[in-house]
Image: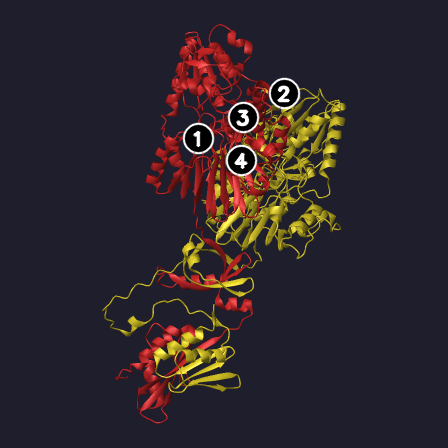
Chain colours: A red, B yellow
Amino acid sequence: SASCTAAGAGQDVGRSCILVSIAGKNVMLDCGMHMGYNDDRRFPDFSYITQNGRLTDFLDCVIISHFHLDHCGALPYFSEMVGYDGPIYMTHPTKAICPILLEDYRKITVDKKGEINFFTSQMIKDCMKKVVAVHLHQTVQVDEELEIKAYYAGHVLGAAMFQIKVGCESVVYTGDYNMTPDRHLGAAWIDKCRPDLLITESTYATTIRDSKRCRERDFLKKVHETVERGGKVLIPVFALGRAQELCILLETFWERMNLKAPIYFSTGLTEKANHYYKLFITWTNQKIRKTFVQRNMFEFKHIKAFDRAFADNPGPMVVFATPGMLHAGQSLQIFKKWAGNEKNMVIMPGYCVQGTVGHKILSGQRKLEMEGRQILEVKMQVEYMSFSAHADAKGIMQLIRQAEPRNVLLVHGEAKKMEFLKQKIEQEFHVSCFMPANGETTTIFTNPSIPVDISLGLLKRETALGLLPDVKKPQLMHGTLMMKDNSFRLVSPEQALKELGLAEHQLRFTCRVHIQDPRKEHETVLRVYNHLKGQDYSVQHLPDGSITVESILIQATAHSEDQGTKVLLVSWTYQDEDLGSYLTALLKKGLPSSTS
Amino acid sequence: LFQYCLSGHPTLPCNVLKFKSTTIMLDCGLDMTSTLNFLPLPLVQSPRLSKLPGWVLKDGSTFLDKELKECSGHVFVDSVPEFCLPETELLDLSTVDVILISNYHCMMALPYITEYTGFTGTVYATEPTVQIGRLLMEELVNSIERVPKAQSASMWKNKEVQRLLPAPLKDAVEVSMWRKCYTMPEVNAALSKIQLVGYSQKIELFGAVQVTPLSSGYALGSSNWIIQSHYEKVSYVSGSSLLTTHPQPMDQASLKNSDVLILTGLTQIPTANPDGMVGEFCSNLAMTVRNGGNVLVPCYPSGVIYDLLECLYQYIDSAGLSNVPFYFISPVANSSLEFSQIFAEWLCHNKQTKVYLPEPPFPHAELIQTNKLKHYPSIHGEFSNDFKQPCVVFTGHPSLRFGDVVHFMELWGKSSLNTVIFTEPDFSYLDALAPYQPLAMKCVYCPIDTRLNFIQVSKLLKEVQPLHVVCPEQYTQPPPTQSHRTDLMIDCQPPPMSYRRAEVLTLPYKRRYEKIEIMPELADSLVPLEIKPGISLATVSAVLHTKDNKHVLQLPPKPPQPTAGKKRKRVSDEVPECKPLKPLLSGSIPVDQFVQTLEKHGFSDVKVEDTAKGHIVLLQEAETLIQIEEDSTHIICDNDEPLRVKLRDLVLKFLQKF
């Protein structure tokens, strides 16, 4: 059986952390933080893993799906402060980018907000030393039984879905994924791996998004209009991911329309971020990969680095600023500066979790209480445009169709929306669908078939029989399953006896059948022979006067007292029980009177 | 298990393996040493080459003087250079199911195989192998196509004529099989048949065989391959290196427990130490430049050149070469330099760490940025404006028969100030130079071949312990020029099986088991019995299903209930259906207990007689006797079937069933 417990991201978006137990192996999937909280709730509740005892002893490995902080933000806390020394697996780009975002997160939390008892830079470094980088489609043998394999997930650079497999039992965890290619990444892909359980994100469980082209046109139109009337456009983004897609979009638009208004990208991360995209270009989409020698899409001509002083410059401009949910940092600072002017616009290109400023303004709030009881009135235009690269309902269904799981489990979404999707999945695919809350454990029964070694002799014997004219008729095979230690071998009964050093015990039957026949013995035998031959089995008349039917022996003797009666001795072994018993019964009915 | 050997070149192998009804081609290397028999293709008309005299036979016949030219005592074919293809007649190549590529040098014959033989299968290779392989093919096609040659010589190939030619033309093998270069459309068609794979990816072929590429440490994306079923494992080792250069280190551990290990692609220069050669390369280069001469390095556009540039990056400042321009000229120079920077995942640990910073893994990025290294698609155009001497030029092709290198050989050959440094080991440098003789420029031979040498091979074989080793015949004897060096051959026990071109080997292996799956319902119905401590047995009677080479055992269907009242007419109707076989029996029958059991079941007149080997149990009234011996029981009874069945079942209670 396999069981799954959400320590985070159960009917919620944020602090993704899922525990999977499969055939005795325990794997933790993702180790994220929650953007909506600043207290204990920002990290997953690791007490779900084990109440007592070391995490390292309990967990066989940890897998991180991608570099977003809601999937890896708690990792240094988990490994260095709670304590875990086992292997952590992630793809190469994730391994490269993850520590940078963690350090950024640490700085905002500790240096700016002044929190103590948070993980340190050294802890991030020590944590990353435990990371093993994996290739796409590489089968990583965690130990003798447990293997994992990464599939391309789209979503952000280096994002992967993971298959966790023990023997014939398997679980697939999607992380966050995107089923449609975008301007810089390809679409998620998985083969028909038929997992026992598919754990999928469901951020957009109820959304069926319109075509990407329309959204892009809409976005460009809004940016263009605002810039034309002299307004400033703020686009809060995370440094890596959507930012690059939107930069490519604006860059080509500016080029085509010959626009002059400056585009800025905040934070020192940007240039670095673009560099990662250049070096890991094999993880981007086909088009970018094909043309990168001639023109590298991540070298931008129109997009310049932002300086804090620029925010007060007059005239139009477009600024990409981090973080993406307006919950802290530079994006929030610029937002405060520009919010009061109705000419300006803020475009939220991604999902915002509850509690963030982003979430508040998207839900229509226009008076925000800031630090120090200050009220900020939002006059600027607020636009929401879903550019975050999650699969929509259609995409999720498509992935399920691709992978053909036996059970589906939804995480990383809102309960109400999940409920809708769950019904849809159960209706369309006739598989069970679960949506556990945090701390709830779902158990599914996998009932795997058992692989055994069959001796080639036995298999050949059986397949040779299978080649007989009537192939469609199922062939019965008979063998002995030998179980020793953990090995299972199916061999012929003879071989089993031989290997165990046991002798065969032969059980034989001999029955006497009396037949009224005054003729000589050999003539009786001939009559018996004629009676039996011509059937499906092979009948032989031997020189010594006996008859064999397959391996059953029939002999005739005269009755000691009655010359008119002959005694047929029918003799067979237990293995021929059915035929022997049948022949005896047949002969008992007497011989047909006419002989030729 | 068969191996068809289609190439005789040990470092450019092409073998076909028949393994469990799957036909797998291992590499398709193209032997380009054939081009050494041809005149160079100059980019601009070369007065020297065009004035070479035609070759005249000893008897004075001149009928070959258009096709063959003589230069410093050597005879060359004046025609478009041709390549020696792998054997195409040994087996029907359209039956090949898959082709596994181990590195970009070993795929150069791919278009000939995929486009000319009716091949319909799939090719597997890693992404760097495909991308760089494409660059090598592009460069090859480009350098031959841009110098159209009117003449195509074929008369000399006639068997009768070839006999009359001087060596080495006389001894050239399979000249009728030599082919002109393929075209770009053919390259594109061939490459479109490739499916990309990653190291340690398990690829299922038809449910019967699993193939897995492993890092071989020789070049970007280079791989060895494991070909295995559940019970047999063939390792294909081709072009591996244990030196730390730029690629990911070789994965040795996964080669363990092989039944057969096919070993190809060892170093071609077993006596040279690559590190020493790099040192010599640098010092010769510096010396020539300091003396005001130019340095020509004939090379491939990818591979060792990355390591050479890295050495020079560390070396030029200390050697006072900072003002000397380095030129890399190839139609694919730019692509090669760019591609080298994006394969972080395929690089050695140090280079991977740089990418995490993020910095380009190879320092040639900095050489380009600081204008120390410049690259050009060809000598035409921009290069002719920038060209300053003295300088260092890296360009192809290492055979010196085509590509921009021909131009520089003609340009610099007359001055003893200049030096040509050979680093690629694929061609004999003397043969390569032959059509340029007499030559004033210095020639330095620093072959850098990082592939396994015989000491490393012997260590590797001890480590991974294959049951059998298969290798080209060249590896089973010392090199012909150094016949006393018995250390320059493979030494292992049992001795390796060797192959040569156009040979078919039967590989030794014995398979005794196959994988089968027992469905859960059937597994639940099994009743295991512990026969000996730790060993349990269960008899299995089940239905065997075989599909796509996978075997599954299922619970037999319930026997259909006989329809009541159905009349049976013929005897044959009553022949028993294919019922489960009766198990074998084992054990012995303790007579006392047996008699007690009989009595319990109502037999009151049981009599026991001792015999020589056992006992006879007599049921007097029923006129039935049961002979019991150590390993047999014989029930002899009269016409009483219910009695017989009852006795049978009582006997069976004492025996174990198998």
* Amino acid type at mark 3: Tyr
| Chain letter, disc 2 residue | B
* SS assignment at label 3: helix
The numbered mark at residue A277 is 3
Residue nearer the viewer, A225 or B380: A225
Query: Which residue matches tag 1?
Result: A12
Q: Can residue B139 be seen in this view?
A: no
CB contact under 8 Å: marks 2 and 3: no
- In this rendering, which labeled residue sits more in front, label 4 or label 2? 4
Compute the Cα span from label 1 to label 3. 30 Å
* Amino acid type at mark 1: Asp
Q: Residues within 10 Å of mark 2 (few under 14, many from 20)?
A: few
* SS assignment at label 4: helix
Query: Which residue matches tag 4?
Result: A46
Residue nearer the viewer, B627 or A480: B627
Residue nearer the viewer, A555 or B281: A555
Compute the Cα span from label 4 to label 1. 17 Å
Q: How crowded is mark 3: few (under 14 residues within 10 Å), some or many (20 or more)?
A: many
Is A412 located above or below residue B578 in the figure? above
Residue A198 coordinates in the image, percent (x, y): 43, 40
Q: In which quarter of the image is residue B309?
A: top right
Q: Which of marks 4 and 3 is nearer the N terminus?
A: 4
* Amino acid type at mark 4: Phe
CB contact under 8 Å: marks 4 and 1: no
Q: In which quarter of the image is residue B134?
A: top right
Q: In this view, does B414 lie to the left or right of A11?
A: right
